[in-house]
Image (spheres, grey):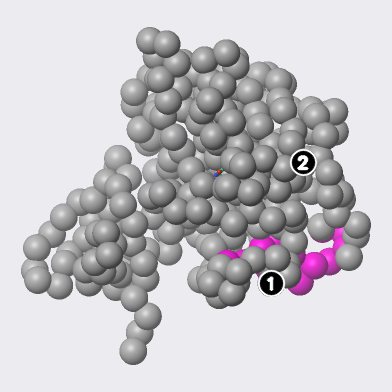
Amino acid sequence: MTAFKERLNCDSFVKNLETNAFGKRCAVFSEIGSTNTYLKKNAEVLESGFVALADIQTGGRGRLGRSFESPSGGLYMSLLVKGLDDTGISSSTVKVAVAVCRAIEKVSSIGNDCLQIKWVNDIYYGGKKLCGILCELVKCGEENCLIIGVGINILPIARKVSPEVRKIATSIADIIDDHDSVISNDIRERLSAEILKNLENMLYRPLSCFIEEYRDRSCIIGKDIYVIKGSELIPAHAYGITDDAKLCVHFSDGHFEMIYSGDVSIREKK
Ligand code: BTN
């Protein structure tokens, strides 16, 4: 395998950027609790487009209060965005998922349209999770700011994560069977640059430009699922995604709902 550069630095990160503002100011940590938490704490004083990156997170955070294991060998990046209006903020989850899928497919040799999105915004390949996304709102003075956190597994997953994560997660290296030319030593720089370029192009455009691709990439539509409410797993069938990205579900007791937040899991066929 090509030597994976274990330490990122600001210079090599900035050199790859093709953006106007996103990432031009950055902080790179060899180890930090969570890059999202760093931006949250400093949002008032940092400018829009500021990016925090880490080689390792010791307290990586996921959606719904979960933790996100973040050993070395992954890309852990958070972006601060100010000045989005309310519709931009609410639709950003969808846009980020599409932006990250496109970026991973372009930079790795995974192949176009191979990555899937598990509602709301986990990125999957072959039934396993490759990337998690955590979008958070924070108050910056009078306005709301958005923090977009992206965690992508790059090196083989088995080596560093817990047995529970190993069962459900995959990595770029696992997917492509690790050809030397693909896991290049600057893959994190190229991936982060591509993600930021996509986000800069997409976040300020209407959701309608991306919802079709979001639906096409869904690995949930047409599946029997569980809707997870606290510790309860409620059986349902997912039959669509609305134009504003709500999941349309038909519960086994007969009622229909359009859910806008929470989590679901795919029911295994018996
Ligand atoms: C999830 O899977 O529920 C979302 C995971 C999001 C992980 C990223 S890694 C960079 C940023 N910092 C965090 O603490 N979380 C996000």
Left or right of 91 on screen, residue 132: right
Q: Give residue 158's mark.
A: 1
The percent coordinates of residue 259 (x first, y second) are 23, 51
Asked which quadrant contains residue 172, the reply is bottom right
Could you classify mark 1 by the number of other residues whose Cα lies within 10 Å: few (under 14), some (14-19), or many (20 or more)? some
Up-down: is 42 above or below 73? Answer: above
Q: Is residue 59 left or right of residue 214?
A: right
Point out residue 225 in the picture as x, y percentages from the top left corner: 30, 70
Q: Marks 2 and 1: CB-CB under 8 Å? A: no
Quarter of the image for residue 19 reads top right
Looking at the rendered image, the quarter that the N terminus falls into is bottom right
Residue 58 visible in the displayed image: yes
Image coords of residue 29 (percent x, y): 74, 36
Q: Residue at x 63, y 23 (%)?
A: 50
Q: Hey, what amino acid is under mark 1?
A: Ala
As drawn, the label of residue 255 is none
Q: Is residue 83 above or below residue 17?
A: above
**Going from the N terminus, do you reach mark 2 or mark 1 first?**
2
| Magenta-drawn segment | 169-182
> Which residue is labeled 2 in the image?
30
Which residue lies at the image location 23% right of the left edge and 56% below the top edge? 248
**Residue at (35% x, 84% y) in the render:** 269
Alpha carbon distance from label 2 to label 1: 21 Å
Question: Which quadrant of the figure has residue 229?
Answer: bottom left
> Is residue 245 placed above or below 81 in the rendered structure?
below
Taking the magenta stretch, the answer to whether it contains residue 216 is no
Instruction: Choose mark 2 or mark 1, whichever is in front.
Output: 2
